[in-house]
Image (spheres, grey):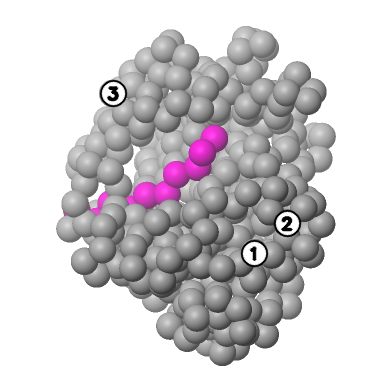
Amino acid sequence: MTYRTDRIEELLNEGVRDKVYPGAVWAVGDAAGTRIHGNTGVLDPEQPDAPMRSDTVFDAASLTKILAVWSSIGSLWEEGKLDLDSPLGTFWPEVEGHALGSVTARQLLTHTAGVPLRAQLKNLYGTDPQDIRDGVLREALHRQPGEAVEYTDRAALILGYLAEHLSGHRLDQLATERIWQPLAMNTTRFGPLPSEIAARCAPTELDEDTSTHLKGVAHDFSARLLGGVCGIAGAFTVVDDLAAFLHYMLGETSTSEQAGFGPAWVTESLTIQTGELEPVRGLFWHPAPGTEPTQDVWVHYGFTGTGMWISPDQERWAVLLTNKLYYTRDRQPLTEIRNTFRGLAFG
């Protein structure tokens, strides 16, 4: 399969001209590594002399769910510390006797657990992190587990808490030590970012309190409420780090690059886990829009304008990082670009 650099550049340049996003950084690769890559636009429209670059740092938003939670849960599963199909209440004292105790980790990973659909942490539980944790883990279910596929940020928040319980470490420490450091993902970290890294971070939405665009601080309110570290969002990353992560997922790494999870977790996750329920899901990954599960192109998106795709069958991966949230919360313009980008990257 050929790599259509010219058409990808044309597509992403149009997105800048149409103000879908200020700029974008992208890469497409395979089992041998990055094959084509590029960047377009500017870091910040208020600073037109500062272009997007390959080392631009992006608010990963929901990609945190993959980079920190999915990967850490996978490492605990492969280590034998987690049975995906055991009710949480049978081994997690915090949820024993509460509704969440009847839910399994697999149901959380497939968004079939029946937990509430919105986080609404501050309104429900206040601002104290322990009160929030207690409230989330003791909340009533929205519906019976296994009845429906309903996306909710709470699934990742709960799994992040579970990973902390099973490992005895905070999620940021767990992800750093088990995943990011072994893969030399040296820029990926939870925020808030130190000033020297925040300086090359792509700004996101306008903060009404400060009248400035958020930069180096997570856009997601739940992440900010919890000090920057939670399973929902809060991580920041660069294109080369995501390339290393996806390259590792394809199983082509040196013996010195061994993250906590391995091929067994990738295979388990990139298969349909939801039976006849719609929309179909793997474990936190789902088939890319516009494709059939048999085409084996899986995707995960971030609300700020980030996205990454992988296909073990094609031995190919792709990353598209934008800060579209600088302009708008309207998803449709970026959705069209994402789908076209995926088509050009995978055929």
To which residue does mark 1 refer?
A: 136
Q: Nearer the viewer, residue 309 or 140?
A: 140
**Left or right: 210 with respect to 252?**
right
Q: Which amino acid, by three-letter code, is at mark 1? A: Val
To which residue does mark 3 refer?
A: 7
**Left or right: 140 with respect to 2?**
right
**Left or right: 161 with respect to 313?**
right
Cα distance in 3D space between marks 1 and 2: 8 Å
**Which-is-in-front pick, marks 2 and 3?**
2
Q: Which amino acid, by three-letter code, is at mark 2? A: Tyr
Q: Residue at x 49, y 34 (%)?
A: 305
Label at residue 107: none
Are discs 1 and 2 less than 8 Å apart at CB?
yes
To which residue does mark 2 refer?
A: 125
CA neighbours of label 1 inside 10 A, class few (<14), some (14 to 19), many (20+):
many
> Dividing the picture into quarters, in which one does residue 88 lie?
bottom right
Residue 296 part of the magenta segment: yes
Are discs 1 and 3 less than 8 Å apart at CB?
no
CA neighbours of label 2 inside 10 A, class few (<14), some (14 to 19), many (20+):
some
**Which secondary structure lies at badge 2?**
helix
Cα distance in 3D space between marks 1 and 3: 46 Å
- Looking at the rendered image, the quarter that the N terminus falls into is top left
Instruction: Answer above or below: position of 268 versus 214.
Output: below
Instruction: Answer above or below: position of 74 versus 290.
Output: below
Q: Position of residue 121 (x, y in %)?
A: 67, 52
Q: Which residues are magenta?
A: 295-304
